[in-house]
Image (spheres, coloured by chain):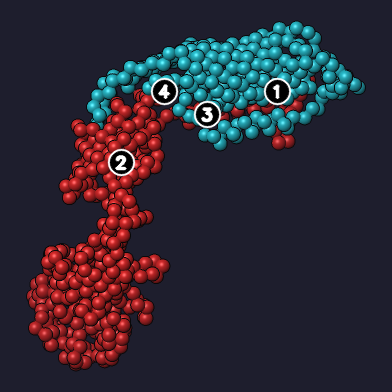
Amino acid sequence: MGTEFGLWGVEVSLRPQKSMKRTGWFIFFLILAASCLDDPDCFQLNNNYLGVSFYVMGSGGADTLKATEIVLSGASVVYADTATSVSLPLNYTTTNTDIIITRADGSKDTLNVTYNAQMQYVSEDCGSRYILGGLAVTEHSFDSIRLVSDVPTKSGGTNIAVYRCPQITTMGLTLQQLYISGTTTQSATTRSTEFNSITADFSGEKLYVDKTASTLYLPVDLNTEKTSYTFDFADDFGLKETVRKLVVNYKIHNVERYKQCGTQKFIDSLYIDKTQTTFDTAAIALDSDGDSLSTIQDPAVVNVKLLRCPETNLTQVVFRRPNTTTTRAIYIKGITMNYSDDILYAGDTTTTVKLPLNPDATTTVFQVEYTTATNTTTVVTTIAVNYTVTFDTLFPGCGVQNIYSDLTTATNASANVEVLTTNDVKFPAVTNIAVEVD
Amino acid sequence: MKSINILLMVLCSSLAWAQKDTTAVTPADTAKSKWYIPTGVRIGTDALSIARTYYSKSFNGWEVNGDVDFGRYYLSVDYGYWARDYASDKGIYDNNGNYFRVGVDVNFLTKDPEKNMFFIGARYGHATFSEHLVVEGIEDPVWGTLNEDLRNVNINGHWFELTTGIKVKMWKFFWMGYTARFKFGLGTNETGRLVPADVPGYGRTDKESVWGFNYQLFFRIPVRKSPAIITEKDKK
């Protein structure tokens, strides 16, 4: 007696069979399990955060807010940092919050918002939550804003996009090191460089005084279509003269692009005046599509590359234990050369050194004075090598450079000095010479 | 969560659509004659509501259920009362109200001579309820101490349900069954600052859909004799 029905071919009977009971229990426990997943999460219940993102008009990129203080409805204070967006807690006990942002330069902006604030019970563990919505901007002092979403968030997200007028005043430069990767591939990598100062000649303002940087942002002269800069390097940046000149020319256009901003100056057609520039390798940078970045932009982009030519005469020496490839650190008192009075690596503790070969000879002799952790007696090792010098143009901007190859041990070298099979000087340097240290 | 809901509904539907009759045959003239005249009225109650009222400190409620058959279709009506009472150091919340549901079930065991049911149906639900929330002395790191005392009085909520379940004759007039409810489309008409947290008959409001479950005990009052069903066995 009873009707049978099946689940995908499996026959079960409604009454009075066991299989129906199993089906019923199966569904019951599935529901029970599903209901357990409904337990609320107590983390960040209130959606009372206002996301404000900063942009520059006409630019797809984000603007950086450098704020020293953000005041919310008078009493509450948030000390901000440098950011492209901020998430500000709205006062959910009322329906409006007044925001005052103080920038690093002392300027202030205000933003007043209103919203609905409702409350909902969540659970005994979590308590209640505030639900905010209907966000509207009643007043602001920014150049322009856009309401992106009228529902405040629990964290992150953007409710209001703030736009400021572009300020075309700054050119970006990057400092890079040229080298050969592999055997022939030419490459460049960003290089941090120490400066005594960089002077914008039109204003006399000294920038980056005693600073180390790899990317520079320098002001351009908006009164003439030319700006010159004087670079005073603390390190030599691969140049014989540590003071160099960069001169850029450009065109200035007076245009009203945005009503809120009025007539503004825009700069394009940037190029390097190579007749006055004393960098060997200054060039206009290219974007990812290979197009020239000859327009000054806000936020600033890297418009100019200053490239450091490779030092082609650096041979690398490794200090290692006898008859092994295990390196050994030595305490260097000094390394002298037979063609210069310079003393290299004095006071350093290291396992490798890079030593400059004499570009005007085919033999160079180095005297290395050192001690070790186990032997405090000063040891002097003579590294004397012969080599072949040829001439080649590795990089067009660097001109013809000396190429050093076929290093061999000179007769006056110490017995513990060995030239390795990798006996050609590379850029960057590779280990050519090994010194065995007891 | 949605995927689980859908899985359950599909599972239940599969049970029904895979139905095949192996024992009973109903002559066309018998089955069609006066099929729309009810054969009985079932009246019952939800045992789970009674049990929860007894065992749970935060719930108090009851529910009565009734249905009447029109062939394989059943008009189903539920009426109930539901009150919640939560208290902790983070606040006090209570609500109470009445609700009803009305809808239709479709029985997929049309050939069962005892009129046992495996059904899928739909409901419209409506509740009238009040609620009260008190929050005192909650500290916010930015905005200080929070104190709130909010009420909603006699507000309405309405929603829709998809249902499935079984109802089985146990002994003479006594029936048992269960109903699983997939509830969705909740709307409430509050105008104040308090957003409803729990609607009688529906449940928690912070999800787009919720599940409900009833285990029901029925007493069936027959009003006329069911049309005869001739089985294969009878034929032989």
Residue A80 quadrant: top left
Judging by colour alone, the chain drawn in cyan in this rendered image is: B
Tell me the mark number nearer the camera, choosing from 1 and 4.
4
Q: CA distance from mark 1 to mark 4?
A: 36 Å
Residue B79 quadrant: top right
Q: Mark 1 — residue? A: B106
Dot 1: within a 10 Å radius of its alpha carbon, few (fewer than 14), some, or many (20 or more) residues?
many
Q: Mark 4 — residue? A: B195
Judging by colour alone, the chain drawn in red in this rendered image is: A
Q: CA distance from mark 3 to mark 4?
A: 17 Å
Q: Quadrant of the C terminus of chain A?
A: bottom left
Q: Earlier in the sequence, mark 3 or mark 1?
A: 1
Kind of element beneath mark 4? strand
The three-letter amino acid code for the residue at tag 4 is Val
The three-letter amino acid code for the residue at tag 3 is Ser
Question: Label 4 lies in what chain?
Answer: B
User: Which disc is residue B209 wearing?
Assistant: 3
- Residue, x 56% and y 36% (percent of image)? B3
Q: Where in the figure is residue A297, as x and y percent of width and height?
A: 30, 61
* Viewer can see residue B155: yes
Kind of element beneath mark 1? strand
Q: CA distance from mark 3 to mark 1?
A: 22 Å
User: Which disc is residue A87 wearing?
Assistant: 2
Q: Is residue A8 left or right of residue A262?
A: right
User: Is the C-beta separation of discs 2 and 4 under 8 Å?
Assistant: no
Kind of element beneath mark 3? strand
Q: Earlier in the sequence, mark 1 or mark 4?
A: 1
Tell me the mark number nearer the camera, choosing from 2 and 3.
2
Q: Say above or below: A426 vs A104.
A: below
User: Is the C-beta separation of discs 1 and 2 under 8 Å?
Assistant: no
Question: Label 3 lies in what chain?
Answer: B
Kind of element beneath mark 2? strand
